[in-house]
Amino acid sequence: MQSPQPLFEAVRKTTFIEAPRLAKRLGVNLTIASETFQHTGSFKFRAAYNLASKIEPSRILTASSGNFGQAMAYACQLLGKSCIVVMPQTSAQVKIDAVREYGGVVDLIDVRVKGRAVRVDELAQEHPDAFVASPYDDLLVIEGNASLGAELAAQNFDFVIAPVGGGGLTAGLIKGLRDAGSATKVIGAEPLMANDAARSLREGRLMINELEPQTIADGARTVSLGHHNWAILQEGLADIVEVPEENIKEGMRLLYSFANLKAEPTGALSIGALLTAREKFAEAAVCCVISGGNVDAEVYRTILADN
Amino acid sequence: MQSPQPLFEAVRKTTFIEAPRLAKRLGVNLTIASETFQHTGSFKFRAAYNLASKIEPSRILTASSGNFGQAMAYACQLLGKSCIVVMPQTSAQVKIDAVREYGGVVDLIDVRVKGRAVRVDELAQEHPDAFVASPYDDLLVIEGNASLGAELAAQNFDFVIAPVGGGGLTAGLIKGLRDAGSATKVIGAEPLMANDAARSLREGRLMINELEPQTIADGARTVSLGHHNWAILQEGLADIVEVPEENIKEGMRLLYSFANLKAEPTGALSIGALLTAREKFAEAAVCCVISGGNVDAEVYRTILADN
C-alpha cells in the first residue's frame, strides 16, 4: 500500500475573505476564515482525513447526521478505506445522498426504536476489525483540526472566534496556534440554548445537557464537550460567548449581504458572537472561523426572509 | 503623490473551488474560479482599479446600476480619487448604499425624464476635468480583466467559460491567457434572450439589440458588445453558448447545493452554459468563471425555491 497523502496536502487551505463593510458594522478589524469550501463543505474533513489516514483498520464506523459523516466518507474514499455511517431515518435526503456519493455506506435507523450508540455497538460486533470514530472526542480529531490553527498562526490576530459544539474545533485551534508559537486568544461561540461548554467553564467541571438542545446551529447540538477537548479548553479557551438564536440567524444574513458567503447556522456562530458581545472585541484584529456551509435551501430561504 | 499599488497587488486573487459532486453532474473535469470574493464582490474591481490607477484625472464619472459603480467607487477610495456614479432612482437601495459606503457620490436620475448618457454628458460639462469611464468598452478595462486570464493561464484548462455582456471580461480573459502563452479556449456564456454577441459572431458584424433585454442576468443586459471588445472577440472567442433563463437559475441552484457558492445570475451563466451544451465539453478540463455574487436576498430566495 502506498503511504497516504499527508494532511497538509490533502486539505484545502482555508479561504480568507475580507469584508470591509461587514467589519465596519461589527466594529472590528475583521478577517473571515471560511471552511465552507473545504472538501465536503466543512472543517470536519480535516479531522476525518487525519483520523482515517493514521489508524490501521481499513473500515470505519461512525454515527453522524451531519458534516462528519460526509467528511469521513470522502476521506475513506480517498484513502481506499470503507466507511459505515449510522444516520437517523429522518435525516434530510440531501445529507444521505451526500454520504453515499462520497462512497459511504449509510445505515439508517429508527431512533424511536434504537439509539445511534446502540446501533454503532451492534455494527462494531458485526465488524470486529472496524474502528469506531468519534466526530469530536479523539486526539486524532483534535490534531486534524489543529491544521487550521497552524494556518491562522501566521497572521497574529488578537482573537480567533470559532463555534463550540463537542469542542473539537476550538481544541484543535488552540493546539495548532500554540504549536506554532502564537498567543492569539481563542474564543468559543456557543448557542445560548446549548450552553453546556459555557457552564462547564464557569463551574470548572464538565457539565452535560440532559437532551440534545434544539438550537438552529445543528452542529452544536451536542450534550457535552468531549473529554479530550475539555482538558484543552479548560486551560486554553480565553472565553465563551453565548449566542442567542436570533444573532446566529443575523450572522447568516450579514455574511450573505456583506461577504457573499453562504454559511450554515453553526458556521455563522462566530459572527453571532461579535453581535452578542461587541464591546469585548472593539477595534481588535478578529478572525471569525466560518466552520461550514452545508444548509438546506429551505432553511436558508426562511432565515434570509426572517428580518 | 505616491505611486498607486500595482494591479496584481490591489486585486484579490481569484478563489478556486473544487466541487466533485457538481463536476460529476455536469460531466466535466470542473474548476470554479470565483470572483464573488473579489473586492466589492465581482470581477469589475479589476477593470475599475486598473482604469482609475492609470488615468491622470482625479475625478471619474460613470453610469452603472450594478457592479461597476461599486467597484469604481472603491477603487477611487483606495486611490484618493473621487467618483460620481449615475444611477436610476429605481435602483435597489442596497446598491445605492454600497456605492456610498465605498465613498462614491450617487447621482440619482428619473430615467423616464432623462437618460443615463444624457446625465453623464451634463455632469461632464459641469466637471470638465473628469474622466468618463465605460464599464466595458475601454482598453484599460480589458487590461484590468486580463489579470484574471493571467491567473488562469498556469492551469492549462481546455476551456474557460465566462459570461458575455459588453464583452469586457471575455476580451480580458483572451488577452490575459494569450499574453501568458496559453492556448486555452475561451467560451462566452450569453443569455439566450440577450444574444447579440452570438448573433454578431454568426453574422460577422457587430449586432445591436433595440432595447436592453430583461434577462435575469442583469450584468448582461447590454445592447451590444463594446467596439474594443468586438475586435478581440471576433477573432479570439472559440464559441458562444446561448443560455436559456431556466438554465441560469438552475446554475445558481447547483452552485448553492454542490459548491456552497452564492452566485448572482450573471455569475451562474458559465454553469448554465454547461447545462445547455453538455456535449461540447464532455470530459474536458473546464474552468467556469463565476463573475460576481451580488444578488438581492429576495431574488435569490425566489430562485432557490423555483425548482
Image: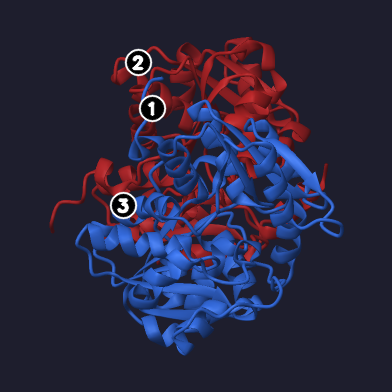
Chain colours: A blue, B red
Tell me the quarter of the picture where residue B204 sits. top right
The answer to whether the residue labelled 3 contacts the one labelled 1, judged by CB atoms less than 8 Å apart, is no
The answer to whether residue A21 shows anywhere in this view is no
The answer to whether the residue labelled 2 contacts the one labelled 1, judged by CB atoms less than 8 Å apart, is yes
Real-space CA distance between mark 3 and mark 1, rounded to the nearest whole angstrom: 24 Å
Which one is in front, A58 or B145? A58
Q: Secondary structure at mark 1?
A: helix
Looking at numbered disc 1 in the image, what kind of residue is underneath it? Leu
Mark 1 — on which chain does it sit? B
* Point 68% across, 39% down: residue: A98
Mark 3 — on which chain does it sit? A
Q: Residues within 10 Å of mark 1 (few under 14, many from 20)?
A: many
The residue pinned by badge 2 equals B182
* Point 62% across, 33% down: residue: A102
Discs 2, 1: same chain = yes
Looking at numbered disc 2 in the image, what kind of residue is underneath it? Ser
Which one is in front, A175 or B226? A175
Real-space CA distance between mark 2 and mark 3, rounded to the nearest whole angstrom: 32 Å
* Point 45% across, 14% down: residue: B236
Q: Nearer the viewer, mark 2 or mark 3?
A: 3
The residue pinned by badge 3 equals A151
The answer to whether the residue labelled 2 contacts the one labelled 3, judged by CB atoms less than 8 Å apart, is no
Looking at numbered disc 3 in the image, what kind of residue is underneath it? Glu
Q: In this rendering, is residue A307 above or below B66?
A: below
Q: In this rendering, is residue B192 above or below A11?
A: above
The answer to whether residue A99 shows anywhere in this view is yes
Which one is in front, A110 or A164? A110
Real-space CA distance between mark 2 and mark 1, rounded to the nearest whole angstrom: 9 Å
